[in-house]
Image (tube, coloured by chain):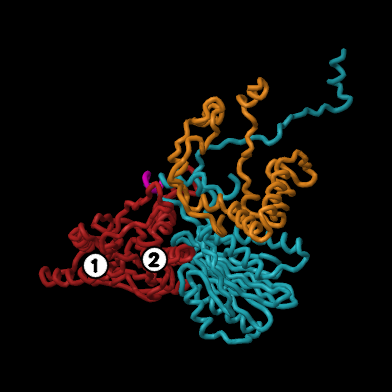
Chain colours: A orange, B cyan, C red
Amino acid sequence: MSLRIVPEEKQLTDAKNTQFGPAAPSAPGVVDTLRSGEAPLSISSKVNNRHPLQSRIEKWDQTQRDLQLETYRRTFGVADPIRREMELNIVKETDFRPTLFGFSAITSPSLDILLNKETTIGWEDIYTGFNDAKPTDFHTEMEKQMGI
Amino acid sequence: MPGLSFENFQRNEYLVNQAGFKPPRATSTGTTIVGCRFKDGVVIAADTRATTGPIVADKNCEKLHRISPKIWCAGAGTAADTEMVTQLIQSNLELHSMSLNREPRVVSAMQMLKQHLFKYQGQVGAYLIVAGVDPTGPHLFSIQAHGSTDIGYYMSLGSGSLAAIAVLERDWKQDLSKDEAMKLCATAIQAGIFNDLGSGSNVDMCVMEMGKDAQLYRSFMTPNVREKKQRNYKFARGTTAVLRQSVFDIVEVVKEEEIPVGSSDAMDVDH
Amino acid sequence: MCSTQKSLMATEYSTEVRMEPIEHRFNPYQDNGGTILGIAGEDFAVLAGDTRQTVGYSIDSRYEPKVHDVGDNLLLSANGFSADGVELVKVFESQLKWYHFDNNKKMLVHSAARLIQHMLYKKRMFPYYVSTILAGLDEEGKGAVYSFDPVGSYEREQCRAGGAAASLIMPFLDNQVNFKHQMDPESKGTKRRPLKYLSLDEVIELVRDAFSSATERHIEVGDGLQILIVTKDGVRKEYYPLKRD
């Protein structure tokens, strides 16, 4: 475990087949192009020629979080970060998301509080991206219903 | 992904490197900006020219941004970056001060700005002079796009910074009065306006003094008023070619015929 | 000159792509900004230029006149890389002197234009980086303006702007000198406005407005405006200050 302040600038030297798309349940070694609705993924285009900033920005928050948890581990023992991560996961998984309290598909005040972000605003809060949470597709729906 | 989008990076790389396209140019505020402390306050000033290459994009743009009522900031570099980054930090500082129920501090604004800019490794091209008064006194900072900061009694930034700092170095002294500081900043900006092609037009100024509201002087000085044109370029009516003409009724016009009451003709019909 | 091909040095493992053009050769050229403008009238021609000389964002001089009275009622200005402009005018003046020795007569404006063409084309492979305008009176005494590209292609015109703000001034001239896109008001917008020669006063007003407007929107134009006017009585000079920001 390290005490990194900024994300490591490391280019991927290898990539798994299924790293950039969901694996097919029936054939876990290949990307489920039927389900993702994308053409066969070009892994090289996902790895090469990315903006030099992209991975830094994407990994920024996680790096800060890791540093914080690591500091807690060294100070209070491993129980502290474990408890924090558990709490975080509980809040993430919860179904109780009243809009009245500011919950939405992308925002969660409880999560913000646990991550100590309730009084800050960043570009992520303004440019929320297109609705990333895709509705479950036809195949998943069928599999669920048929119990496959 | 939420946040600033990198979506088109690979496509744009192709367009620029392989397909022979030129990358688009952002409006840059070529700019002279200065800041100067005085006895119990601080003043910042800026020119008002924005350029795209050698063309003047805006003759009277605002380079002084409000971060909080008593903390202001002058921006040089990419116009969009200076504007957006101050807006973002303005919101953050407001949230922060509401959460703590205290007046916002200049150091907080500076810390937020430098942390944000550091995260973007200088790709957010904002070069700022942050100044203001808070309960701990007057403050003056400068921030570079990569996230480094400086503290000082007087400073200048932008393409006209060399002209401006020359004036500041010549005339600055400890414990200036408010009026002296304002005059000094105006002179420094004018040095930039006249000697740097990236700077021009007017002098904007903001004075922040302990125990008083910040004062923004938009067009504090206007040393570059355009002279009256020699000729009048009003075109005579009929100068524009008429290619086609079509007239539409905005409302439907219904013509009604008035028939006088009790006219003998009307009566005749019934018979 | 530098290679226009961007060097792209990305490998699968590198995180950064270098994009600066790599300079392979010594680059002897420089852009000194500034703008010139020539207009021909019925019995006069004017050639005007601003007096600012720049490099990048710096002003090298606020008064460096670049329109020259080269003798024989000819006005010449070469705008762009000022060292080349000065050189071109000097060589022209010397050639003109030899022309006088050899032929013992004044050089006519169309001959001067042809001479300049050859001076420019001689350096086809290492050109003068200038846009050149020559003004004078033709054999009938009518105003003549000749404009040249850097390697000698030339044309006689009614008016022409050259240099940094040429693209700003030229459309204005098209409209105000050649009445482009202007209809005769009498015809209620159906017939073109008939062409006519502008008077000297009108032309000087147009030139002053063209330069004060270019000064507003182009950073390399300003400081001062010199106008040289050639008539059958000789060459007259005028100077007007421009904005200095």
Percent from the top left, x then y, of residue B76?
54, 66
Q: Mark 1 = which residue?
A: C88
Residue C147 placement, left or right of B62: left
Give the residue type at disc 2: Leu
Residue C48 placement, left or right of B165: left
User: For the magenta stretch, what is the residue range?
Assistant: B15-19
Q: Are marks 1 and 2 in contact (CB under 8 Å)?
A: no
Q: Mark 2 = which residue?
A: C200
Q: Residue at x 74, y 44 (%)?
A: A103
Q: Residue at x 72, y 54 (%)?
A: A118
Q: Quadrant of residue B179?
A: bottom right
Q: Chain of mark 2?
A: C
Secondary structure beneath dot 2 equals: helix
Q: Residues within 10 Å of mark 2 (few under 14, many from 20)?
A: some
In this rendering, is residue A53 above or below C98?
A: above
Mark 1 on the same chain as mark 2: yes
Residue C156 placement, left or right of B96: left
Give the residue type at disc 1: Leu
Q: Residue at x 66, y 25 (%)?
A: A144
Percent from the top left, x then y, of residue A41?
47, 34
Of discs 1 and 2, which sits in the foreground?
Answer: 1
Residue B13, magenta (yes or no)? no
Does the image show residue B128?
A: yes
CA distance separating discs 1 and 2: 28 Å
Q: Chain of mark 1?
A: C
State the mark number for residue B146.
none
Does the image show residue B219?
A: no
In the picture, which quadrant includes the C terminus of chain B?
A: top right
Percent from the top left, x then y, of residue B68?
69, 66
- The residue lying toward the viewer, choosing from C231 and C63, is C63
